[in-house]
Image (cartoon, grey):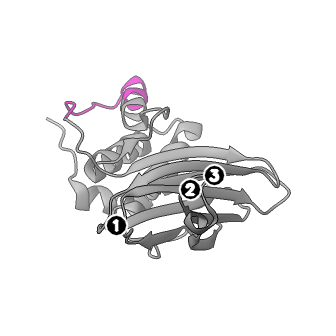
Amino acid sequence: MRQYPGRLAAAAFVSVSLAACAGHQPSPALAGVAEPDGQILAALDIGMRAEIAADATALMAAASLLESSGARPAPGEADLQQIWYARAAELGETVPPARGRIAGPAYRNGTLAGGEAAVLRDSFHSGRAARVSLQARGGGMLRLSIRRGAPGSGAGARETVCETLASAAPVSCQWVPVWSEPFTIEISNLTGGQVAYSLITN
C-alpha cells in the first residue's frame, strides 16, 4: 500500500515538487509569512504550476499541503484540494481517502489588469489576531490595504489599519480588532500588466 506523507513530510517535499514542474523556477521562500499562510501559498503555487505541467506528483503534494493546513475555499472559489486530487488520480496517482476539512484559513485566487483594484469585505472577531496574506504570481507589484468598515461607512470607521506591498515575496497584515466588525480588503495592481494573486484570510 502506498504511504502518504504527513504535514512535515509534505512540506519537505515542496522543493522537489516545484522542481518537477518542468519549465518553471522554484518560488521564493515564504519565510516572511507566518504558518499556516506560508504553507497555503506554497501549496497554491505548486498546484497551479503542476496543473500547467500535468505533474501528478506535484498535484498530489499541493493537495496534501492544502488538506493538512485546513485551508478552505472562500465563498465562490473552487475547491482546489478536491480538483487537484481528482486530476492526480486521472494522471495515475493513487489518492488517499477523503477526510473532513477543518475550519481553517480561507483562500482566494484572482487576476487584476494593469491599474485595476479588487475590493473585498470580511469580518473579524474582536480580541483575536486577524491576518490577511497576499502573494503576486508571475511578477508585478500589488498593494494590500486593510481598512475598518465597509465602503460608505463614516470617515472615522474607514481608518487604514495596514498597508503593504506584495510582489513575488508574499506579505501579511496582522492586527487585533477592538470590535467584531467588517473590514475592507483592497488589492491594487500598481503595474501596467496583468497580475495574478493569491489571498489568504484567517
Question: How many other residues sit within 10 Å of disc 2, few (<14), some (14-19) or many (≥20)?
Answer: some
Question: Hey, what amino acid is under mark 1?
Answer: Glu
Residues in magenta, as a range: 86-99
Which of these two is toward me, 151 or 144? Answer: 151
Distance in Å between CA atoms under marks 1 and 2: 23 Å
Dots 2 and 3: beta carbons under 8 Å?
Answer: yes
Q: Is residue 20 visible?
A: no
Count residues near mark 1 (Cα–Cα under 10 Å), then give few for <14, some for 14-19, many for 20+.
Answer: few
Question: Mark 3 or mark 1: which is in front?
Answer: 3
- Residue 140 at x, y = what percent? 74, 62
Give the label on residue 94, or none.
none
Hey, what amino acid is under mark 3?
Answer: Pro
Majority SS type along the magenta span: loop
Quadrant of the frame with the C terminus: bottom left
Q: Which residue is drawn at 53% across and 49% down?
A: 121
Q: Position of residue 118 (x, y in %)?
A: 67, 49
Residue 140 drawn in magenta = no
87 in magenta: yes
Residue 184's disc is 2
Which residue is labeled 1 in the image? 35
Which numbered dot is residue 151? Answer: 3
How far separated are the C-alphas under marks 3 and 1? 30 Å
Dot in front, 2 or 3 = 3
Q: Quadrant of the N terminus?
A: top left
Q: Is mark 3 on a helix, strand or loop?
A: loop
**Where is residue 106 drawn, in percent x and y?**
40, 48
